[in-house]
Image: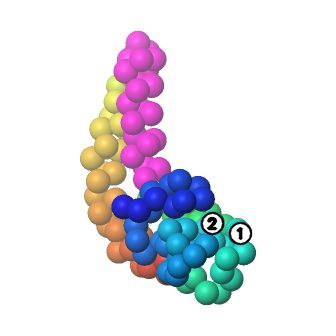
Amino acid sequence: MPTCRMCTQNYPLSQFVSGNGPRYQVCVRCAVENDLVGAEEVPQLYSDDLAKSRLALFGRRYRLWFFIAVAWFLYLTLGSGIELWSSVFLVVLVIATLATPVLHFLGSARFNAELARLTP
């Protein structure tokens, strides 16, 4: 993968501005920030709002996995010593652990549709 000569980051070739001279080997973000091209000339540029929307979408997609991992960590470190509540927490964690892959799979069509809408 080529490296941008301004920010020294590696990007796929589709994220580079075509041209010679000052535009050679410059990513779209650096080209727009340094006024080498206009924002309307590079359709593959992610605006700040679009990047925030995509990050929120991925956050919603994977938050169940994060909460399950944190809940198991808390149960194994703190919750297993409580007499009545430890069995209740264990049952809830087992049900949530079994339901999370199913919910993740069932939400994949909606996630892919929203991701396609947010992809320039």
- Determine the residue positioned at 71% across, 69% down: 34
Q: Are marks 2 and 1 in contact (CB under 8 Å)?
A: yes
* Amino acid identity at mark 1: Asn
Question: Is 47 situated left or right of 119 in this image?
Answer: right
Note whether 93 is above or below 42 in the view shown. Answer: above
Q: Quadrant of residue 39?
A: bottom right
Query: At which x and y percent is residue 43?
Result: 55, 83
How many other residues sit within 10 Å of disc 2, few (<14), some (14-19) or many (≥20)? Answer: some
Q: Is residue 114 visible?
A: no
Q: Nearer the viewer, residue 69 or 78?
A: 69
Counting from the top left corner in percent of width and height, residue 95 is at 31, 43
For the image, the number of numbered tags is 2
Disc on res. 34: 1
Secondary structure type for disc 2: helix
Q: Main secondary structure of the magenta part?
A: helix
The location of residue 33, given as percent across then percent down, is 70, 68
- Which residue does the numbered mark 2 point to in the structure image? 30
Residue 65: give x, y in percent of width and height. Answer: 39, 46
Type of amino acid at the residue the image marks with label 2: Cys
Q: Residues within 10 Å of mark 1 (few under 14, many from 20)?
A: few
Residue 65: in sight, yes or no?
yes
Please state if 98 lies on the left or on the right of 10 as rendered.
left
Q: Residue at x 43, y 53 (%)?
A: 62
Q: How is the image coloured?
A: rainbow
Tag 1's secondary structure? loop
Quadrant (top left/top right/bottom left/bottom right) for the N terminus: bottom left
The quarter of the picture where residue 81 lies is: top left
Residue most extreme to the bottom: 41
Viewer-nearest residue: 55 or 45? 45
Q: Answer whether residue 97 is magenta in the image.
A: no
Looking at the rendered structure, which numbered label has been put on residue 17?
A: none
Magenta region, residue range: 62-84
